[in-house]
Image: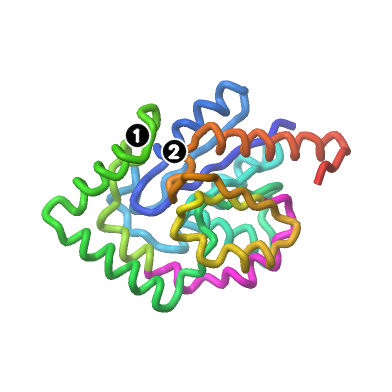
Amino acid sequence: MTVQVVLVHGIRTSATMWRAQVEHLHGLRIPVTAVDLPGHGTRMDEPFTLDGAFATIDAAVTDAATRGPVLLSGHSMGGLVCTAYVGRADPPPVAAFIAASCTAIPRGAGLAAYRFLARRVDALPDHGMWLAEQLTERTLPPQTRADFGAGGYAFAAQDVALASLSVLDLVAALRNITIPMWFINGQFDQLRVNERMFTRLVPHAELIVVPRTTHLVTAMRPRVFNALLDLAVATLDARARGHDPT
């Protein structure tokens, strides 16, 4: 059976952030589904809820699992929600997991400060669009520069989504994860704050830290991220043939 890839975007963005990865996987004839969470992308008019996010991921994973082993990858907020999903006491049908830019516990003063800053930016007349465009212009290569905003920015969903993350029991979830797993962070990613704890809780997981890279690792270093997708797919292919490379 062919490995199936499911991709889950981060906060404010949408499935379009994965364009470089979708194009890469299509070139290898690997089936891939990039979802839009509630309140984002094609679902901008829907309210964001954590239950809705879990339901969206589960629907994509459950459908993909009928055709082959599922490689799930989530970025930032999507990675945190995917971590909680993969680490359920009753594990979902996920065969391997890539957690991108999401090694932080979203609680306490750190989350409060992040929400305060996000609300201040959202209160600007353009909701921070000029800042977002400057950031992507200065940090992302031309081929991925438009991808994060191509599906629109979910300004209205941002604070609700951030607040909802505080109920996730990521420590318990991480302890439950036994499938092949990779953490990937940019060197200058602000969400590396609990990186050591995350890797300690999942001792079999591999950690990749990409030099000279920020939080937007999938778009800033698409070839590096695509190589990790290739590694994860190859790992699942080897397991299906009865060879466990881990």
At which x and y percent is residue 65? 66, 42
Q: Which residue is found at the position 69% from the left and 66% from the top?
A: 200
85 left or right, relative to 52: right
Q: Residue furthest front?
A: 212
Q: Which residue is found at the position 54% from the left and 32% from the top?
A: 223
Residue 179 on the magenta span: yes
Instruction: Look at mark 2 in the image and give the residue it sits on.
Output: 219
Q: Which residue is found at the position 29% from the left and 37% from the top?
A: 137
Instruction: Tell me the quarter of the image containing the N terminus.
Output: top right
Q: Is residue 203 visible?
A: yes
Q: Residue furthest bottom?
A: 108
Q: Secondary structure at mark 2?
A: helix
155 left or right, relative to 217: left
At which x and y percent is residue 94? 67, 49
In the rendered structure, which segment of residues is drawn in magenta?
Answer: 163-181
Residue 104 on the magenta span: no
Q: Amino acid at mark 1?
A: Arg
Can you tell which quarter of the image residue 240 is in? top right
Instruction: Look at mark 1 in the image and give the residue it sits on.
Output: 145
Q: Residue furthest right?
A: 242
- Pointer 2 local density, CA inside 10 Å: few below 14, some 14–19, many at least 20: many
| 46 relative to 142, above or below | below
Q: Is residue 56 visible?
A: no
Can you tell which quarter of the image residue 117 is in? bottom left
At which x and y percent is residue 241? 85, 34
At which x and y percent is residue 229? 62, 37
Q: Main secondary structure of the magenta part?
A: helix
Q: Amino acid at mark 2?
A: Ala
Q: Secondary structure at mark 1?
A: loop
Residue contact between numbered discs 1 and 2, judged by CB atoms under 8 Å: yes
176 left or right, relative to 11: right
Report the number of discs: 2
